[in-house]
Amino acid sequence: MNLLFFLLSIFLAVMFAAKKYNNSGYKDASGHSYFDTMTDSGRKGEYLIYRYLERLDGQHKLLANIYLPKADGTTTEIDLIMISATGIYVFESKNYSGWIFGDENSKFWTQSLKGGKKFRFYNPIWQNKKHISVLQNHLGLGSEMFRSYIIFSEHCELKKMFVHSPEVKVMNRDVMFKEMALDVAHLANRLSILEINQIYNDLSRYALADAATKQAHIDAMQWRN
């Protein structure tokens, strides 16, 4: 009886979470099913960020998994974009655990896990800077229109983090909503509702990429590495 109750509780919890997912705009924005998202750490992190952004006040539009073409014929993949009156916010999601050490000026950052295991990963500020550069060139807008957010899971601790650029923020996901709400509330308006919709409609063409586009992006990344 206890086992049956336990299994029923799990089933109901999954059904509730799936319903919440289906009610989120992330499903339509990304094209990913609940199962595909929950079984992929990266997608799950993006979904959780998207849910926070949906709750923000004011006129804004959200995009997920944009494969934007570059001048060399390859693409850059942008996790999440929010277009609002105060500018264009570009998000790089890192759904990591452990301790994170990083400096904006260092090419590689370090993830330290229990047991002494350490892993290096490419500086996500530099990674997102490249995304913003492609986005800026595509839209023909000045750099002042863009803000870079590097979002880590709340399951990691940012031990030593040095960020020098005022338009760049690095934080855990559980404090992101408060930081974003402050930005949206206090930064000067730069875009009209018409401009927000125009930019959204333009970039929407590069969402929901087909399998061939995704594979070409992966192949190009592997070739560069």
Image (cartoon, rainbow, N blue to C red):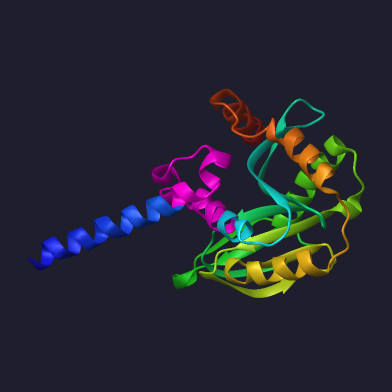
Q: Is residue 38 left or right of residue 142?
A: left
Q: Which residues are magenta?
A: 21-49
Magenta span has 165? no
Q: Residue furthest bottom?
A: 159
Q: Position of residue 7 (x, y in %)?
A: 19, 59
Asked if 141 appears above or below 117 in the picture, the reply is above
Q: Quadrant of residue 147?
A: bottom right
Image: 63 above or below 208: below
Q: Position of residue 186 (x, y in %)?
A: 82, 69
- In this picture, residue 42 sits left or right of residue 202: left
Residue drawn at the location 70% of the way across and 55% of the way down: 124
Q: Nearer the viewer, residue 219 or 211?
A: 211
Q: Residue furthest left?
A: 1
**Rendered residue at 51%/50% (across/down):** 24
Closer to the camera in the image, 96 or 140? 140
Residue at x 53% of width, y 58% of height: 48
Q: Is residue 136 visible?
A: yes
Residue 37 shown in magenta: yes
Quadrant of the snapshot with the N terminus: bottom left
Above or below — where is 122 with respect to 177? above
x and y, in percent, of residue 2 in the image? 11, 68
Please name whichever residue, 90 or 82, is drawn nearer the observer in this view of the structure: 82
79 w.r.t. 207: above or below: below
Residue at position x 39%, y 44% in the image: 35
- Say whether residue 225 is visible: no
Q: Quick one: quadrant of the C terminus?
A: top right
Location of residue 109 in the rendering, given as x and y in whole percent from the top left corner? 67, 62
Q: Magenta-highlighted stretch: main secondary structure?
A: helix
